[in-house]
Image: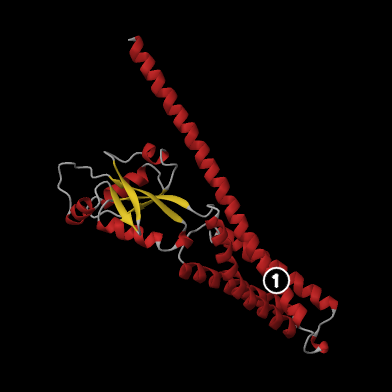
């Protein structure tokens, strides 16, 4: 009886220690993710500032009479600052600084945000009634639309090189579909997903392997080759939160070749595991 009580206490202590470690990892990940968002947001702010300064500095190069007085310049800068703050806050709450998406989707989100900001800028400039200020501010947003994509790619590349933009990723599945999914993810470095493991979680072990799984298992037993990198396959009896805690709460991608896809999605949803 004493041995049983001791073993139970040890299990509870180990579970509590694992939960504390998991909470620390989650807190650390959220803090690093917040710093990454602030870095990208600061990059957008610098681009907006440059977009405002470039027309103001080059306006008088061709015609001195085209330079407005200081009062108009101050009003235009104030209007642009208000809309710029709206643009940054809107992008933050829409998740444009935290979502990892392809270049096409990122550009589409940027065009949408700039279009809304330019529309709001037009309304504010229309209330003032100065057409020159309106044209200048819309030109500023056009310059920002060119600067921001290049700056974001440059910053994300820098974050990727120092390891801040990469996120550990596991693929649930060990067949042909899982390999193709892994190749698609690894081909786009802007996503920042670094695949560390494949998880084979066939719930019915007596069920034979599918044709694609047989091919993968025959060619690469114990691992799957993705662009020259051998990524191991982990065999698990059932999916639990502890499985992902041991991997440091990675990003999860479901890519199975069987009809158990929706069962796996349901398990992840019930255990509140993002995928």
Mark 1 nearby-residue class (10 Å; few <14, some 14–19, many ≥20): some
Give the residue displayed 46% in from the left and 70% down from the top: 104
Q: Residue furthest front?
A: 228
Q: Nearer the viewer, residue 151 or 255?
A: 151
Count of numbered circles on the image: 1
**Circle 1 sits on which residue?**
50
Instruction: Tell me: residue 148, above or below residue 165.
Output: below
Quarter where residue 92 is shown: bottom right
Residue 21, x across and y down, in percent: 49, 34
Q: Is residue 271 left or right of residue 89?
A: left
Residue 251, x across and y down, in percent: 42, 50
Quarter where residue 188 is shown: bottom left
Residue 41, x across and y down, in percent: 62, 60
Where disc 1 sits, the SS reads: helix
Q: Residue furthest top?
A: 2
Q: Quadrant of the N terminus?
A: top left
Q: Is residue 265 left or right of residue 163?
A: left
Query: What colour scheme was applied to this rendering of the protein?
Result: secondary structure
Instruction: Tell me: residue 176, above or below residue 67.
Output: above
Instruction: Tell me: residue 10, above or below residue 104.
Output: above
Instruction: Tell me: residue 158, above or below residue 57.
Output: above
Residue 180, x across and y down, in percent: 31, 60
Give the residue displayed 37% in from the left and 41% down from the top: 271
């Amino acid at each position: 009886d004493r041995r049983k009580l001791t073993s139970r206490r040890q299990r509870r202590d180990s579970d509590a220690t694992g939960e504390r470690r998991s909470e620390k990892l989650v807190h650390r990940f959220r803090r690093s993710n917040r710093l990454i968002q602030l870095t990208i947001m600061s990059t957008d702010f610098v681009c907006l500032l440059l977009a405002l300064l470039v027309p103001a500095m080059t306006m008088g190069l061709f015609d001195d009479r085209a330079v407005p007085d200081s009062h108009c310049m101050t009003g235009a800068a104030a209007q642009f600052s208000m809309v710029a703050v709206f643009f940054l806050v809107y992008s933050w709450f829409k998740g444009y600084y935290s979502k990892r998406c392809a270049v096409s989707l990122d550009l589409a989100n940027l065009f949408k945000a700039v279009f809304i900001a330019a529309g709001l800028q037009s309304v504010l400039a229309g209330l003032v009634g100065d057409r020159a200020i309106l044209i200048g501010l819309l030109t500023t947003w056009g310059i920002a639309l060119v600067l921001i994509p290049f700056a974001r790619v440059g910053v994300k590349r820098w974050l990727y090189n120092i390891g801040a933009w990469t996120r550990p990723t596991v693929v649930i599945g060990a067949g042909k579909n899982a390999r193709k999914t892994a190749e698609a993810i690894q081909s786009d470095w802007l996503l920042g997903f670094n695949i560390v493991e494949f998880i084979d979680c066939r719930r019915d072990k007596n069920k034979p392997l599918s044709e694609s799984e047989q091919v993968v298992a025959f060619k690469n037993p114990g691992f799957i080759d993705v662009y020259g990198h051998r990524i191991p396959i982990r065999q698990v009896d059932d999916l639990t939160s502890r499985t992902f805690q041991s991997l440091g709460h990675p990003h999860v991608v479901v890519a199975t070749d069987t009809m158990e896809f929706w069962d796996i999605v349901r398990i992840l949803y019930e255990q509140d595991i993002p995928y």
